[in-house]
Image (cartoon, coloured by chain):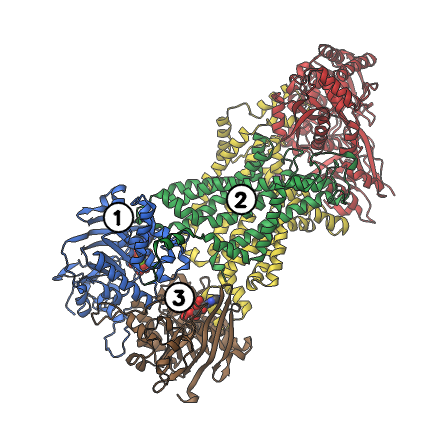
Chain colours: A yellow, B red, C blue, D brown, E green
Amino acid sequence: MHKYIFKRLLLLIPVLLGVTFIVFTLMYITPGDPAAIMLGEDVPQEEVEKLRAEIGLDRPFLVQYGSFVKNIVLHGDFGTSYVTKRPVSQEILARFPATLRLAGAAVLVSMGIGIPLGIISATKQYSIFDNVSMVFALIGVSMPNFWQGLILIMIFSLHLGWLPASGFSGFKYIILPALTIGTSTAAIITRMTRSSMLEVIRQDYITTARAKGQKESKVINKHALGNALIPIITVVGLLFGKLLGGAVLTESIFAVPGVGRLMVDSIKCRDFPMVQGGVLYIAFCFCIVNLLVDILYAFADPRIRSQYR
Amino acid sequence: GGSKSAAKEGEEKNTLIVGLAAEPKGIDPHPVNDVPSGNALVQIYETLITQDVDMNIQPLLAETWKQIDDLTWEFKLKKGVKFHNGEELKASDVKFSFQRACESARIGHIVGMIDADNIEIIDDYTVRIPTKEPFSALLPSLCHTGGMILSEKAVNEAGEAYGEKPVGTGPFKFVEWKRGDSLIFERFDDYHGEKAKIKKLVMRVIPERTNRVIELETGGIDVCYDIGANDITRLEENEDIEVYRKISFSTGYLGMNCLDDKFKDARVRQAVNYALDVDAMVNSVLKGVGTVAKGPLTPNVPGANLELKPYGHDIEKAKQLLKEAGFENGLKTELWTNENKDRINMAEIIQAQLKEVGIDVEVKILEWGAMLEGLNNKEHEMLILGWNNSTGDPDIGLYAPFHSSKHGKGGNRVCYTNKRVDELLDLGRKTFDTEKRNEIYYEVQEIIYNEAAWGLLYNKEVVLGAKKNLKGLKVWPNNKHRFDFVYFGE
Amino acid sequence: MAKKLGVKLMTEKILEAKNLKKYFKTSKGMLRAVDDLNFYINKGETLGLVGESGCGKSTTGRVILRLLEATDGEVIFNGKDILKFNKNQIREARQKMQIVFQDPYASLDPRKTVFEIISEPLNVNKIYNKKDKLEDRVYELMETVGLADRLVNAYPHELDGGRRQRVGIARALALNPSFIVQDEPVSALDVSIQAQILNLMHKLQKELGLTYLFISHDLSVVKHVSDRIAVMYLGKIVELSDYKSIFISPLHPYTKALLSAIPIAKIDVEREKIILEGDVPSPVNPPEGCRFYGRCQYREKICEKQSPKLKKYEKNRFVACHFAGEF
Amino acid sequence: MAEEKKLLEIKNLTVHYITDDGTVRALEDMNLEIGYGETLGFVGETGAGKTTTAKSIMCLLPDPPAKIMSGEILFEKEDLLKKSIKDIRQIRGDKISMIFQDPMTALNPVMTVGEQIAEGIMLHQNLKKEAALAKANEMLETVGIKSFRSKDYPHQFSGGMKQRVVIAMALACNPKLLIADEPTTALDVTIQAQVLKLMQQLKEKYKTSMIMITHDLGVVAEACDKVAVIYAGNVVEYTDKKKLFTNPSHPYTIGLFGCIPDVFSDEEELSPIEGLMPDPTNLPSGCPFHPRCPKAIEKCSKEKPKNVDIKDNHFVKCFLFQK
Amino acid sequence: MEAKIDNKERSRIRNKKRSQWVEVLRRLKKNKAAMFGLFIIFMLIIVAIFADFITTYDYAKQNLDEALQSPSFKHFFGTDEFGRDIFTRIIYGSRISLLVGILAVGIAIFIGGGLGAIAGFYGGKLDNVIMRSMDVLLAIPSILLAISIVAALGSGLVNLMIAVGIANIPRYARIMRASILSVRDQEFIEASQSVGASDFTIIVKHIIPNCLAPVIVQGTLGVASAILSCAGLSFIGLGINPPTPEWGSMLSRGRDYLRDYWHVTAFPGMAIMITIFALNLFGDGLRDAFDPKLKN
Ligand SMILES: Nc1ncnc2c1ncn2[C@@H]1O[C@H](COP(=O)(O)OP(=O)(O)OP(=O)(O)O)[C@@H](O)[C@H]1O
Ligand SMILES: Nc1ncnc2c1ncn2[C@@H]1O[C@H](COP(=O)(O)OP(=O)(O)OP(=O)(O)O)[C@@H](O)[C@H]1O
Ligand SMILES: [Mg+2]
Ligand SMILES: [Mg+2]
Ligand code: NI
């Protein structure tokens, strides 16, 4: 297992390198001059040139890329934001807690809704409950996120006054954004749980468990769910990985100081080091979550465990 | 955060929570030039002199000042001014600050005229600031955030990390910046002037307009920046809330690339001006928040030519002019705007209105960076932009947008060229006599107006919302408001 | 079964495998699925290949047809080593060699009709350029294998197992092959259908003079169809004899055990039951001695160290055991 | 067979599967009985209804689509079909156990085999987990697996060992009736022989009655006392093993024998039953076997034949024997 | 054996070939929810095609005097901030939204599916290279891709499609590869090889048709998520150029009026919701229909 994890971590290097290169290229060919953008509408050109030189934009592409990679490898330095003049790593770390909390809460919400709904739907396939819960879950996905967020704010902050409309400094603040994301992703988990459970409850070992005289609830929760877990872990992992990259729309709506908003702002400003660092961070999270998912597989399924070497 | 705490009863209201529309880029005055940063900076730092809400120059760190010659100004500093780190303000700090400012690209256009290396320290409290050329707009420039005075010692001690530990002379000390969320300030008890009435100032960043207003209404914040036009009426009806409005220094314009064949002819540009129903536009998009622009300068700028009148909506005349210019069959053009909602709305209306005189406009929404690049390459035909006169001086308001040396990247986005205007603008910089100077700028504005260098759209308003029990709030036209004299009343 | 039909056995070898090896690389080590096989098949006869699951029967069949590339060895078909053929030669050779698969469900493309499936070999090799001729041939093939005309447009899922297997057989016959590998063609079928298919194959061999390599794990079926039988264990042939002698006097202890393990649908026969201990070991890194060593009741020291070669015992009888015939 | 000797009695059991594609008449008027200590062989081809019968006894039919239309299943004289699900659970795994066809799928891949065996023990013998696990280890030893392997997962066992585990699981509570649904079909011959022998031994040791479902007459010959041959949901012939093998009577049974290649003789060709199993949603009228029956008479397509006892509990459902 | 028929009859039968899709369709037809979804989608398509006949208003015609009117008989869904008829804009908007969704998914399927097919079929190094690049692409935030593309190519329908399409490529590559892997090792592929079929024939004739089902299912669901991503892009200002009506941008630009004029966002929001809902219902139904295991 250790060896496996080590191998996987090693594999991170080419992926991350690929990511940085693509992002670098992307940013390079994307029109828009960071210096000009930074200075705004009413600043003369000489100043722009001066700034370009100051941040090293006048160097050739490969030189820029090379020094970027070199700095990371040799000094662990991801560069300094053009805009805030602070180290990129600090900026990202400053946003990370909010993103992590929001992602965690959102995943909890969607699992909390999705898994039970999926299980009940599967065990009562084609019943009214099944239909209602699927419809409910679908409505969640169907609503554009920002619209749903605004509507939630209208209801819970403005009219009921129960929850704050924006900000991120306590438990109360997480509820609405987590709900916004959670409800729109719950459907995926519901659907996955349902189909995975349907697959599993047709298996002989489920019948075997029943044949032992086991209670239905235990048959479902112990035997079936344990085996249905893999696809559920997969979607939850994917979701979590994606959310760690920040949920831009939700973050903007609820003024959550998360990574997603930072990224969008940085992209808009062509804050190259920030974008680079950010994407690298996102890719890293993504890969790590994937790895975690694969490790979780091993816990969920002994067959997979024995494959990891 | 602590949003609700402001609204809680019984508790002594010592904390002011302000909702900003965007996050400051930094709180070191030199590497930044954006309004949100300015919002925060004015709490911490101070300039030698300052403009009051009516744009009159007032002493601040300098008690008196005088012009020695065309190139030099002398300032006498107030004594006993303490920085937040306990140091006293000295002339050396002033010199240091301007030297540092001039090295920064971001504010170079504001303080660039200053010959920083030759600043002369007469004594601890007297400093002479020379300019490279005669520069009549120096005083307003010194009021800009770029002219803020830093503590030399603090900057040197902090080194790279100065951006995290700003030290100024302002009424509030910086405490903490929760990135993406809020900035927290605390009253500076050794302030040289009247101490701030509130103990703590929190500036929260709430980018979504609707949400910011909801926070104001529900008590999450006490002051709300940049209130949307369609929220004003409701807020004005709200008994707990006071809406403050003031015309700002920024002018929205419909630019026409004068190098483009279609817009070379002033008659076409005039026709466009006639074709626009700016009144309707301002009513519809800005919901009456803001006024129809009458000239290139906002009326509150000293030196604005108030005799100019809006072109007015005259379709016949527009068609006539087009015909004269050889476009009786109309023309096709492209209108660029960035993803700013108000501008997109404007663009849509402009599109509809110009259609009536036979100008077929394709609206293109460009991502800001990409748009800038296109503008810099002068690939545009029509564009919607605003010009923010950052110091409220006619020079800043007119030189860059209309001087032919500033084509394209320099600020003259419409590539307007007029020898007379060039001459006058150069002259204006060297003219220190207010009367004469004003006359020069009057003429410039008239020419620009007549030649319809811009399609004049609107002058924006600064709109602040605040709790009614918040007293003493003053509103600056540049949207950089100080909160030290604010307090909670009944 | 040819001899049982009284067809005169030709002694001309149609196919011969020499030192045939197929190893798979796996994470646990080298998997020796087929390890040094030597056998031949005469024209018109049926060679049965029996053995337990995973002993390498299918792999043998696939390697012979070059559906898998052999690791080593030769497969001489009609005098030429087909393992040395290039792509085009292989395509040509395949017209003469075909395969029928074990699983009639998996071996038919679920999205193709019976007609499309049977005509595929003809189309691929561009046998007919006229549509009529092609159709006629397909109908002819269907008739040969006993499929009703109305099924031409049926999809595999609409057919039962027996009919599917008939489609598979028709496809194999389409190119008029002389040699067919039958990879457990009946083990997925019910007894009554199995009997029908066995009879069909019997009939086809008789009428078309086909040669079969008949793979199965069911000794009774293999015995029914084969002239000679090869018993495989863990990638090696342990015994190869004519069909009768294997049943009357098996030489290898494994063959013996295998025979006694078949449940026989008779109640009055008395048989000595040999129940083997343990499971078939894994072909990954097999023991160096006799592969049957671990389960053999007659094992001796020499068996552990030295792998017995397939030796001639008497005419037409080969066995790989150090003590062949001694028990 | 004397009344008191009956452990299980199935009377007129009819089971339908109601599906979108029509109604599958899986069991039609099924009658069976098993005495104490007896092994009943259940032979028939795919889809004949063997598993359905087994699941009906366990009350494990999937509902929907399965519907028990009529009949009773008397286990020790009590009708299982009338019991509450709670009572059924008491019986399942305790008094009646079942072994499934495919050991690969009958074991839960994410639980250790020890836990799986212990599960039933904990449920029915009120034992704590440790005690149950100890008992499970004992059972493993009984079926010839070293007890230290109880912490292993199913995928670490070979097919034969898995089937042994399944057997251990089924026998853990010493049931009165063991239903084995094709317990060796998925196994290799040599392994099948091992498992069959083991089952035989255990059955004798625990004096369990057994229903052995299979499609292989060879297995029946080796392992059973009585045989029921079923075709399309009907028991067409039911008697003890000896009578069946010496005197197969129903044309279908005869046909079945004709399909099996004989290892000991040198026959040229097999004499298979012509035709195919009927479409279960659209069974032929009358005797369901009549379209394939070489001896069919006119009556066969019109009427359903009755069960006839041709000689000493040798029941055949065929008009040929009806007087 | 079985009954014989003469040649004429044979040809007649041959020409009566039914497709396996018929079977899928039959199963689909039984799924009421899916049919309901399909019905809505059909309605939307019809509305999109016949937009000109359904409404008498011009979607771009401004009438500032009638701005922000509530729903009435004159304007079923009210008017927007420029006095344009929202009903009309939603109707015309269906064209854009559906088109963007479908084409974006089309691009993604075409490129992603192709890459996945190659990776799955040839395996080995090529597989590794392609799939690792997909990982890389997946790790890049789609917003960055979208902004870059829109910034580089300009905003507008086609570029929006490309942006959403490219971001979705890895998803289809994965699905395609997975299903190819499951098909590739099946015996019918070997059977086809054994009769001498070339790789190309095998891919085109056997593998792709058998892999289509999961891709189609993902596709329908993908259209839904593409429409949503589009709305999301509108939110950050990267929508379609005005005055072209598009639901996402109607929604996001109308959000300032959320409190005072509910109808400005409610109707485009509902339109998006209903479409996504229908597409999801249909996609789920399709999945069930394609999956014989779920056949009851
Ligand atoms: N492509 C492959 N990669 C790795 N191992 C393989 C592959 N194909 C077959 N094997 C292994 O080779 C051995 C022989 O397999 P083969 O399919 O030839 O057995 P078989 O005798 O046909 O068995 P069965 O009766 O189950 O069909 C097995 O252990 C199998 O796991
Ligand atoms: N869940 C179900 N839904 C619909 N029909 C079913 C279901 N289960 C079984 N059937 C049908 O009922 C009939 C009897 O099935 P059963 O499983 O009892 O046969 P079997 O004798 O056990 O066959 P096998 O030897 O293949 O296991 C078959 O026609 C089968 O198609
Ligand atoms: Mg095989
Ligand atoms: Mg069964
Ligand atoms: Ni869109």
Tag in front: 3 or 1: 1
Could you say where residue B17 lies in the image, as x and y percent from the top left?
Answer: 76, 41
- Judge left or right: residue E240 versus residue D322: right
Chain for numbered disc 2: A
Residue to which mark 1 is pinned = C95
- Judge left or right: residue B162 versus residue D273: right
**Label 3 element class:** loop
3D distance between C-alphas at marks 3 and 1: 38 Å
Could you say where residue E105 lies in the image, as x and y percent from the top left?
Answer: 53, 42
Residue with the most extreme right position? B490
Could you say where residue A250 lies in the image, as x and y percent from the top left?
Answer: 65, 44
**Label 1 element class:** loop
Q: Please name the amino acid that badge 1 sits on.
A: Gln
- Judge left or right: residue E187 versus residue E252: left
Q: Residue at x 59, y 27 (%)?
A: A32
Could you say where residue B61 lies in the image, as x and y percent from the top left?
Answer: 78, 25
Tag in front: 1 or 2: 1
3D distance between C-alphas at marks 1 and 2: 55 Å
Chain for numbered disc 1: C
Residue to which mark 3 is pinned = D102
Q: Please name the amino acid that badge 2 sits on.
A: Cys
**Label 2 element class:** helix
Determine which quarter of the picture holds residue B181. Answer: top right
Same-subunit check for callouts 1 and 2 = no
Q: Residue at x 58, y 33 (%)?
A: E150
